[in-house]
Amino acid sequence: MWLRRWFEPGSPARISSTGPILLILLILLFLGATGTMIPVRAQSGLDLVVPTVRVVSAGGEELGVIEVAAINGSPGAGTPGPVLFVPGPGAPASTFSPPGTFDAVIRGGVVEAINLEGNTPVPADGWVLSIPPQEIGSAIRAGLKLGARVNVDLFSVEAPAESVTRTISGFDRSRGTDELIVYRPGGGRTRTLTNQWGFEVVVVKDRVTSLGGNNQAIPADGFVLSGHGASADWLRAHAEVGQKVEIRGTQLTLTTDATTVILGAEQALAGARSALARAERGWADVPYGTVKQEIARAEEKLARALALVSVSGTADSGTAGRGPEAVPVAEAIRLAAEARFLAERALLLAIPSASVSLRGAWYRPVETSAEEIATTLDRFAAAGFNALFLEMFWDGRTLWPSDIGKQLDQFRGWDPAAVWVEEAHRRGIELHAWVHIFNVGERGAFSPGPIIEAHPDWALRTFDGSLESPLEPGLVYVDPAAPAVHEYLASLFTELVTKYPLDGFEFDYIRYPAGAGQTATALMTSEAGRAAYRAETGVDPLELRPNRPADAWRQWNQWRMQQVTRFVAEMGAKLRQIRPNLLLSAAVMADPSDARSSKLQDWPTWLKEGYLDFISAMAYAEDDVEWVRGRASEMARQAAAGGKAFAATGITTSSGPLAVAQAEAVLEAANAGVVFFAFNYADGGQLWQLRSGPFRLPASPPYRTAEAARRLGERIRERLSGKEPGDPLYQAARAHPDLAREVEAALSDPVSSRGLERLHAALARLAETTATAPPDGAGAAGEWLLDQIDWLIRAAGPET
């Protein structure tokens, strides 16, 4: 595991896929790399405070500088950089960094160990500096090696102010590809009217007040900067709450100064206080004492920063009146940065951690040995996940050695599926088979894949004969309307579920290609599907066009949609005959209207008819947390209409630092779980934040009713014991002992439907004693806790 193992014969690290590269780097390290003053990672140019690790000689001479991209967090998608893991209240015990990361353990100003296999323990009296593989060489050249002396400065002030500029593409018009548009008040437009594929910055009185999202309201005393593509990336990299914004002609200037850092700290504190208030209102499971302590520490630091600067205006107005005069600006910046760090830590700890929750991630396997699989699953479990959605059929090939299909070339010669299932279960992780249904190849990669090569009449083709989906370039599909396709896939997936003790089966690409239901250029059919429709209706699909004629077009769309639904129903029934407890789910388009009209995917009907146990809608939006929240709320509503089913909305980890915010939004939107796309892309910082926040406590999915109910009951008992005096549940119980005894009596049977209903009723009566007008954005008293019991009651069903 540690550095010395790289030189032991036969050690796993020596034969891993990253071994040869890292071994070369280690040889360079031991030969004695020459120090350099060049930072390992260049900053954006606007960072006034840059955490730094300085490598020094025995005499104190600076040999090299490593600029840290993030502390206890993610540097963001596409911008890998060093992450410094700092111990603190409620902090996870390890880094969760993947194998191949250069983790330097620092204690007492010395690098005392180096780990290259990931998931490094963080010492209580030190730090871990985690260097991604692509920057290991630079770190070594900076002098980072075993035994190196280092000085760590979490809040190194680099400059009193910094600015950056960019050319504006236009004003008050629709946003185009890669454009930066400024939306100003007036002209009848009150919002930007943009879709979710961008990034927006709200400016009030020349100061940035919020980041992210789309279709933002245009402030009367400000404007909105809206970027797409390259411009969105630029805003993500440079914009920060509190910055001063100037527009001269088409030139945009963003300036970071002391005011920026102070306003950022104030906003972080406001967020922490708001999260704490919501947690208290909902009786959420939160370390209340620690959260309040961190908030108090942040307030003290911020007060000292404010005392060092001349202040006019208020933070919530976003005014530009704050600014340094003849004062120690650097110290004010440092104190404000420290206040923000403490406030953000408090906010993370104030995120509720449910005992009843599905915590899943999709994952495409790359491991080539049982040892590598075990390492990945160790990291997965340590981060707090309880359900792995393992990709087992994609590009028309199988992960497992199949008698029916063709196994993926990289896995031929062994059975990785068997190892994945066994090792996942050994760690208490559910293993759900994630399979592509009708997408069976990618033109160019497999041209077009073994299924279509063997059965060209099954392939969906455009009316001019092309195999590629016009609106999904490169993707190749078989026709859901071809009867032989159903038969083949049924035999393949029956083999899979028979062969392995899977916990679940998730349908993906269970649809037609994008635009198939509404766009003339995206119309596709197969020889087999065309023949089936013509035999049933007497109509040739090649003669149809969108709404020409309208009735015939609607009939064909409805018929094709029914073929997809029929596959879900019949395939699910077959699989449940083999494994009655198999959980069925689907990764579906987040907008049900678009799913039906464009992709002919009628997933609301699948829920209503009971074909699925839960739904994992793909609410992918890199920066738009509110859009994700809206989609998750719709998923919860649709799932509730389906009876026992529930929602576990899918989000993307490519959003970097916003992954946790999106997870919180999903879980707040009455979802009994969340699924991340994908664990392949999750960095150590993201997993650290998940484990510190929503994944802080162990959890069980609601359909594991007895296990989840026992886990929740144990947490309620512990909370009622008074170990956390600031816990609102404990305080209510202490104020109303008679009602508290009813709750304790109900906890004697927290597993049966009747027992769960008694527990819900007892807690609801206790919650009524604190029923007052909820603060803005907060639900009813005790709602968070009662929701978990509701999910269990729904999953358990009525007693017979």
Image (cartoon, rainbow, N blue to C red):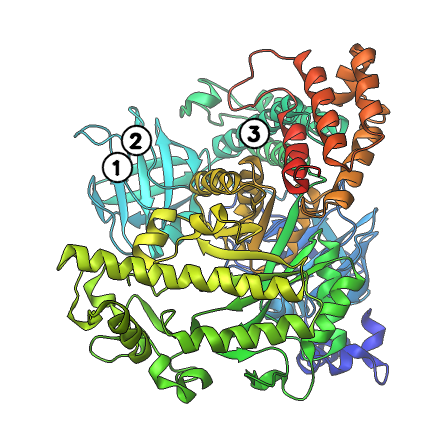
The amino acid on which the numbered mark 1 sits, given as a three-letter code, is Tyr
Q: What residue is shown with label 3?
A: 271
Q: What residue is shown with label 2?
A: 218
On screen, residue 732 above or below 219: above
Mark carried by residue 707: none
The amino acid on which the numbered mark 3 sits, given as a three-letter code, is Gly
Q: Nearer the viewer, residue 363 or 526?
A: 526
Q: Residue at x 66, y 72 (%)?
A: 498
In terms of sequence position, does the residue under pointer 2 or pointer 3 come before the other? 2
The amino acid on which the numbered mark 2 sits, given as a three-letter code, is Ile
In terms of sequence position, does the residue under pointer 3 or pointer 1 come before the other? 1
> Considering the numbered disc 2 on the image, is that residue within a helix, a strand or a loop?
loop
Q: Residue at x 23, y 49 (%)?
A: 169
Q: Quadrant of residue 318?
A: top left
Mark carried by residue 183: 1
Q: Is residue 67 left or right of residue 252?
A: right
Q: Residues within 10 Å of mark 2 (few under 14, many from 20)?
A: many
Q: Mark 1 and mark 2 in contact (Cβ < 8 Å)?
A: yes
- Tell me the quarter of the image containing the N terminus: bottom right
Q: Is residue 798 left or right of residue 443?
A: right
Residue 72: tell me if it is visible: no
Q: Nearer the viewer, residue 477 or 752?
A: 752
Q: Residues within 10 Å of mark 3 (few under 14, many from 20)?
A: some
Residue 528: image x %, image y %? 32, 78
> Considering the numbered disc 1 on the image, is that residue within a helix, a strand or a loop?
strand
On screen, residue 282 above or below 238: above
Residue 11: image x %, image y %? 83, 80
Gap in Å between the C-alphas at discs 3 and 1?
Answer: 26 Å
Q: Residues within 10 Å of mark 1 (few under 14, many from 20)?
A: many
- Tell me the quarter of the image containing the C terminus: top right
Q: Quadrant of residue 551?
A: bottom left
Q: Residue at x 77, y 75 (%)?
A: 371
